Image: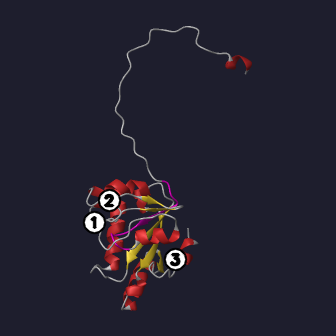
């Protein structure tokens, strides 16, 4: 052990001509939970309620143009069909989810934008599978948001039944009125 400390090169050569490289480095966010879902389902509103993050919230799609990191939650810009191939902003941000421990998948159950919640859930999960099997296999909790706007509770019941058959946990919430949010935070 004593001799290993004193080892140093005693002979130096001329060396060789060096190489120059251009390297593109990417920084991936590190958070315990990633928020995924279609645009305008309440992801930014959710992260603003549960953390000190100041995500932009507006009544139009793609208000979140870059991932936002709260204390333990990363808000990923809205995903749409084809995200794994670069449609929308998806493929630039799906890589950030890879390092998260679990996913909170927020779905608008109100159908306010004319979409079916079951189809939304299936399409987003399909994008996760196409991007990475690792993403598709992460633990996922579904947050059925905008319950305050739901006029027919049978829509939620049908949605919940569909997901429970797959073994997926579903929680009804209203980010606007803080309903159900506290219970969700203990699931992480």
Residue 98 sits in quarter: bottom left
Q: Is residue 37 above or below residue 183?
A: above
Q: Nearer the viewer, mark 2 or mark 3?
A: 3
Residue 181: image tag: 3
Range of magenta residues: 30-41
Mark nearer the N terminus (1 vs 3): 1
Quadrant containing the N terminus is top right
In front of the other: 30 or 160: 30
Q: Which secondary structure, mark 3?
A: helix
Q: With 158 as the anchor, is 61 left or right in this view?
A: left
Residue 117 showing in the rendered view? yes
Q: Nearer the viewer, mark 2 or mark 1?
A: 2
State the count of labels.
3
Mark nearer the N terminus (2 vs 3): 2
Residue pictured at 48% horizontal, 79% vertical = 171
Q: Which secondary structure, mark 2?
A: helix
Residue 25 image position (x, y, % from top left): 39, 41
User: 10 Å neighbourhood of mark 2: few (<14), some, or many (≥20)?
Assistant: many
User: 10 Å neighbourhood of mark 3: few (<14), some, or many (≥20)?
Assistant: some
Residue 81: image tag: 1
In front of the other: 161 or 76: 76
Quadrant containing the C terminus is bottom right
The residue indicated by pointer 2 is 90
Mark 1–mark 3 contact, CB under 8 Å?
no
Mark nearer the N terminus (2 vs 1): 1
Cα separation between marks 1 and 3: 27 Å
Residue 155 image position (x, y, % from top left): 36, 87
Q: Is residue 31 magenta?
A: yes
Q: Is residue 166 above or below residue 94?
A: below
Cα separation between marks 2 and 1: 9 Å
Q: Is residue 21 magenta?
A: no
């Amino acid at each position: 052990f004593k001799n290993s400390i004193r080892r140093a090169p005693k002979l130096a050569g001329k060396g060789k001509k060096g190489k120059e490289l251009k390297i593109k480095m990417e920084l991936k966010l590190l958070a315990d939970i990633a928020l995924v879902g279609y645009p305008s389902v309440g992801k930014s509103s959710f992260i603003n309620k549960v953390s000190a993050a100041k995500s932009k919230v507006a009544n139009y799609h793609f208000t979140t143009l870059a991932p936002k990191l709260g204390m333990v939650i990363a808000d990923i810009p809205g995903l749409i069909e084809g995200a794994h191939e670069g449609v929308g902003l998806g493929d630039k941000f799906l890589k950030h989810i890879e390092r998260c421990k679990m996913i909170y998948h927020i779905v608008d159950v109100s159908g306010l934008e004319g979409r079916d919640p079951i189809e939304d859930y299936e399409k987003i999960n399909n994008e996760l599978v196409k991007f990475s099997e690792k993403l598709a296999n992460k633990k996922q909790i579904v947050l059925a948001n905008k319950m305050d706007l739901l006029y027919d509770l049978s829509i939620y019941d049908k949605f919940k039944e569909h997901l429970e058959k797959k073994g997926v946990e579903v929680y009804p919430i209203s980010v606007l009125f803080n309903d159900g949010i506290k219970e969700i935070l203990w699931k992480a």
